[in-house]
Amino acid sequence: MASVQHNGRTTPHGTDGSADGGTGAAPGAAARRDLAVRAAVAQGLISEAEPVVALLDVAGIRASAAALRTAFDEVTAPGTAVLHAFAVKAAPLVAVVRLLGEQGIGAEVASPGELALARAAGVRPEHTVLDSPAKTTAELREALALGIAVNADNPQELARIDAVISSGPGSSPSPGPVASPLGLRINAQVGGGSIGALSTATATSKFGIALRDEGARAWVVQAYLDRPWLTRLHTHSGSQGVPLERMAEGVRTVYELAEEINAAAGRRQIDTLDIGGGLPVNFTSDEETPTYAAYARLLRETVPGLLDGRYGLVTEFGRSLLAKHGTVLTRVEYAKSAGGRPIAVTHAGAQVATRTVYDPASWPLRIAAYDAGGRPKTGPAVAQDIAGPACFAGDLLAENRPVPLLEQGDLVAALDTGAYYFSNHYAYNSLARPGVFGFVATHGAAGDAVRFATVRAAQTVAEIVTESGGGYADALLLDD
Ligand SMILES: *Cc1c(COP(=O)(O)O)cnc(C)c1O
């Protein structure tokens, strides 16, 4: 990450008790966030010209990566090969994937763009897993040439892999063993969670091979017996809204299938199980719960054989690695009222918080109010709408939310937005993608210092014109 601003100084002002003025202890997540907001103002990161920015807490991301590694180290037999592959879609930012790589975490990718981004971040092929449900033959060929792990979604995709292998993958001269570990994605059909759009293990989910459908299990077993190079099984049974027990049930289902296939093969043909991601995130407080440790212990209780050293493991966590460490910070452009309801009009709406705006009941976000100097705002809570800049009435970050009454020039922070929010921009109203800045906050005797680094520059208006076909302005002036 390139440093853009250095050592901005702010005075200590703990708001949650975790910034313990002057003792030199590392500030907690909420205190780090407050320091970063204050410094973003002081250092001109957020301004009239750039009224919405996204902030990423580097220390928090490192801590989550370490917690993930430790959780699985504690439940797996010594020597078990474990690859934690970050689901890139949760935060498709090269510097984020690189930071996680520094922490020993690989990449789960699901499109040519995500694969290119993981490669740009320096993720090695052996730490990369390709999972998209709609891989083209060219993508399969590239993945196999690179030696990237591939989980086939369906029988037709497996037939394409057969063809790629028998024609010799990529540049390799002759048919033969491929470097890529290959497996099938299984829908364990254990049921969904509270958010339908994120439930991957329903009876009719579009992902993987529906294991409980008639004839499916026998077909899968035979597919492995026919292909000695199929050595993995994959499932991703949960995501936000799915209870941990149900996720673990999905993992047990594929473990039992692996045992059945290995028994039928008379050898340990399946050597690695990819158990997907999906740890839910707490969006209601700064507490990080459920923890990776709790999920790992639940797996040990539910599927002890998975962790006894006979299988390598791949995980694919996304949201839980990043969500708590991102903040969208925006200026209140206007404060108004309608029908007795105060409304703060900001620059953060559907373009950065698409899911929240379109499905607020499933994706409520915490809102923190700051004054124009970036200090936490005090005063009685007043129910108000926090609106975005987009031209439709539903463009609200929060509706009727009690926070100190916001005024023109104040700042609003949408918390827990590090995954699937500002990095998954929605181009409605040609609103620019905001800049993303990582921060490191230190707390010492000389005061608090916050250092920012550009992760992604804000999109310019000229770039918007280009992306909108600016180079083809005359294209439709066709003669009849
Ligand atoms: C989205 C996805 C993940 C990550 O899910 P999270 O809920 O963000 O942890 C993992 N694996 C696959 C195949 C996915 O599609």
Image: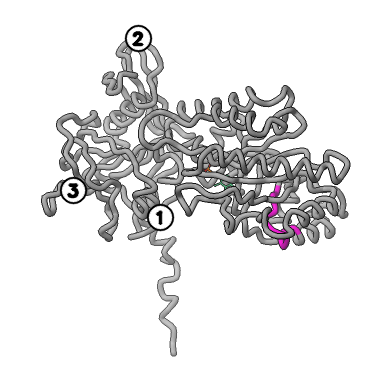
The Cα atoms of the two marked residues, 1 and 3, are separated by 23 Å
Name the residue: 38% across, 22% down: 28
Which quarter holds ligand 1?
Answer: top right
Tell me, yes or no, if residue 116 can be seen here. no
285 vs 456, left or right, is left
Q: Is mark 3 within 8 Å of ligand 1?
A: no
Task: Specify the label residue 426 is tagged with.
Answer: 1
Q: Secondary structure at mark 3?
A: strand
What's under tag 1, amino acid-wise?
Answer: Tyr
In the rendered structure, the answer to whether residue 146 lies left or right of residue 328 reads right
Q: Earlier in the sequence, mark 1 or mark 3?
A: 3
Nearer to me, 103 or 315: 315
Give the camera-side residue of 129 and 275: 275
Using residue 256 as the reference point, say whether residue 34 is left or right of it.
left
Amino acid carrying mark 2 in the image: Thr
Give me the disc on residue 343: 3
Q: In whole angstroms, how far apart are the C-alphas of marks 2 and 3?
A: 40 Å
Q: Quadrant of residue 159?
A: bottom right
Discs 1/3, front: 3
The residue drawn where x is 44% and y is 61% is 467
12 vs 2, nearest the viewer: 12
Q: Amino acid at mark 3?
A: Ile
Seen from the viewer's position, the closer of residues 446 and 84 is: 84
Tell me the crowding category of disc 2: few under 14, some 14 to 19, or many 20 or more residues within 10 angstroms, Cα based: few
Q: Nearer the viewer, mark 2 or mark 3?
A: 3
Chain-order first, disc 1 or disc 2: 2
* Stretch of the chain drawn in magenta: 150-158
Give neighbour class at mark 3: few <14, some 14-19, many 20+ (Cα, 10 Å): many
Residue that mark 2 sits on: 23
